[in-house]
Image (cartoon, grey):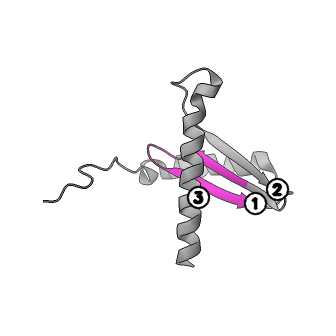
Amino acid sequence: DKDDADRVAAAMSGVQSLSRSLAFFCEDPQMRWRQTLVEFDGGWVFLISAGEGAYLGVSASPDVDMADITFRMQQIVGQLGKALTTPPRENLGVRS
């Protein structure tokens, strides 16, 4: 339902934000985040960059072919291209 979708979207946004902020850990602050993989007892969550300001998340069972999932996610991002890109917000908090 909408509440679940909102909660998942917020959580994924937090995960990608944390992942992006860890570039310094790889000793290169200019390094760009590409993907994050989270493992749970019951499966996986894949999160990949899908353009400027956009990402794609997928949940999968524990026995999934991880290479296949990642490959298919990259295909989807390639097919959708700029449609997934979100332009930066401007004038936040400014009233007309």
Q: Residue furthest bottom?
A: 1
Q: Position of residue 18 (x, y in %)?
A: 58, 43
Gap between marks 1 and 2 measured at Cα: 6 Å
Amino acid carrying mark 1 in the image: Ala
Position of 62 with respect to 26 (left or right) is right
Are the residues at dot 1 and dot 3 in contact (C-beta closer than 8 Å)?
no
State how far apart marks 1 and 3 are (Cα). 16 Å
Question: Foreground mark, 2 or 3?
Answer: 3
Disc 3 residue crowd, few under 14, some 14–19, many 20+, Cα 10 Å: few
Residue 10: % across, % down: 53, 60
Main SS, magenta residues: strand
Mark closest to the chain's N terminus, 1 or 3: 3
Residue under label 3: 11
- Above or below, comparing residue 6 to residue 54 in the picture: below
Residue 49 shows in this picture = no
Q: Give me the residue at 17% from left, 59% from top.
A: 95
Q: Secondary structure at mark 3?
A: helix
Give the distance between the C-alpha atoms of the residues marked 2 and 3, in whole angstroms. 22 Å
Give the SS element for disc 1: strand
Q: Which residues are magenta?
A: 45-59
Q: Is residue 33 magenta?
A: no
* Residue 74 coordinates in the image, percent (x, y): 62, 46
Q: Disc 1 marks which residue? A: 60
Percent of width and height locating residue 69 = 72, 51
Whether the residues at callouts 1 and 2 have beta carbons within 8 Å, the answer is yes
In the depicted view, which residue is nearer to us: 91 or 46?
Answer: 91
Q: Residue at x 66, y 44 (%)?
A: 36
Give the residue at mark 2. 64
